[in-house]
Image (cartoon, rainbow, N blue to C red):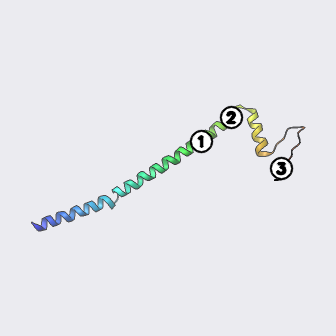
Amino acid sequence: MKFIIAGLVIILLLLQLRLWKGDGGVMEVIALHKKVKEQEVQVGVLEERNHQLEAEVQDLKNRLDAIEERARADLGMVRKGETFYQDAS
């Protein structure tokens, strides 16, 4: 009878070890939940960036002055008759 109880206790301990440390165990599930939350935060940041870029694209498609402003700021373009001054600092 003692051997049966000892055997069952050993089996129980092995199953507990596998539950906590084995493949698909509790520790792995906790780590995966943490990764999912991190990726959800990252997705939120990227979605916000996409919304900003989409708004900028719509602005550039619909407004000529937005295109002109972008060309002046990024490319240093000037209109005819204007003089371009570059700051030395």
The image position of residue 72, as x and y in percent, is 79, 42
Q: Which residue is at 13% across, 68% downward? A: 3
Q: How dense is the environment of label 3, judged by Cα within 10 Å: few (below 14), some, or many (20 and up)?
A: few
Q: Which residue is at 14% across, 64% downward? A: 5
Q: Which residue is at 53% across, 44% downward? A: 44
User: Mark 1 = which residue?
Assistant: 50
Amino acid tagged 2? Asp
Whether residue 24 is visible, yes or no, is: no
| Residue 24 position (above or below residue 83) | below
Amino acid tagged 1? Asn
Q: How dense is the environment of label 1, judged by Cα within 10 Å: few (below 14), some, or many (20 and up)?
A: few
> Helix, strand or loop at disc 1?
helix
> Helix, strand or loop at disc 3?
loop
The image position of residue 22, as x and y in percent, is 33, 61
> In this rendering, would 79 be left or right of 74?
right
User: Mark 3 = which residue?
Assistant: 87
User: Mark 2 = which residue?
Assistant: 59
The image position of residue 32, as x and y in percent, is 41, 53
Furthest-left residue in this view: 1
The first of marks 1 and 2 along the sequence is 1
> In this rendering, would 26 be left or right of 88?
left
Q: How many marks?
A: 3
> In this rendering, would 43 be left or right of 74?
left
The first of marks 2 and 3 along the sequence is 2
Q: Cα distance, mark 1 to mark 2?
A: 14 Å
Amino acid tagged 3? Asp
Whether residue 37 is visible, yes or no, is: yes
